[in-house]
Amino acid sequence: MSQSKLVRDKIPQIIRATGMDPIVRVADSGEYAAQLRHKLREEVGEFLASDHDPEELADVLEVVYALAALVGVDRERLEKLRAAKAEERGGFAGRIIWSGNRPPPSPA
């Protein structure tokens, strides 16, 4: 095996169902955290390279949920945090692009 990577929990049994014998191990907590961050970059890249594939976006969300659980935040709490931030600062539906600030007008 040339490269190890984090895979979904059922991947070994899916591989076994094809008659292959997967080489797997369980990551320790430090490796798991690092692998989740790597997996997030991988999944975001796959979504960006896709033609807006919702399945790729769902993969990103699954990794986000795993990262949240890693830091002790369940899905409900994560959603509450997201909603509170959206309430305070807004979301992205307005499509607003910021380009900086102009200095305040000089006093007359």
Image (spheres, rainbow, N blue to C red):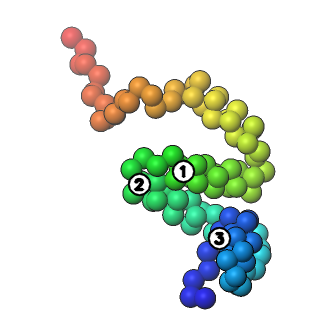
Q: Quadrant of residue 66?
A: bottom right
- Per the image, the residue denoted by label 3 is 6
Give the Cα distance between marks 1 and 2: 10 Å
Task: Identify the residue position indicated by label 1 in the image.
Answer: 55
Q: Earlier in the sequence, mark 3 or mark 2?
A: 3
Q: Residue at x 63, y 35 (%)?
A: 82
Which residue: 46% across, 54% down?
Answer: 47
- Residue 105 image offset from top left, x and y in percent: 25, 19
Tell me: residue 87, above or below residue 10: above
Residue beneath the point at 45% across and 28% down: 93
Of residues 41 and 20, the one nearer the viewer is 20
State the CA–CA distance, disc 3 to disc 1. 18 Å
Whether residue 33 is visible: no
Q: Earlier in the sequence, mark 1 or mark 2?
A: 2
Whether 56 is drawn above or below 96: the answer is below
Image coordinates of residue 79 in percent, x first then y, are: 68, 36
Badge 2 is on which residue? 50
Which three-letter amino acid code belongs to the residue tagged 3?
Leu
Tag 3 near tag 2, CB within 8 Å: no
Q: CA distance from mark 3 to mark 2?
A: 21 Å
Q: Amino acid at mark 1?
A: Glu
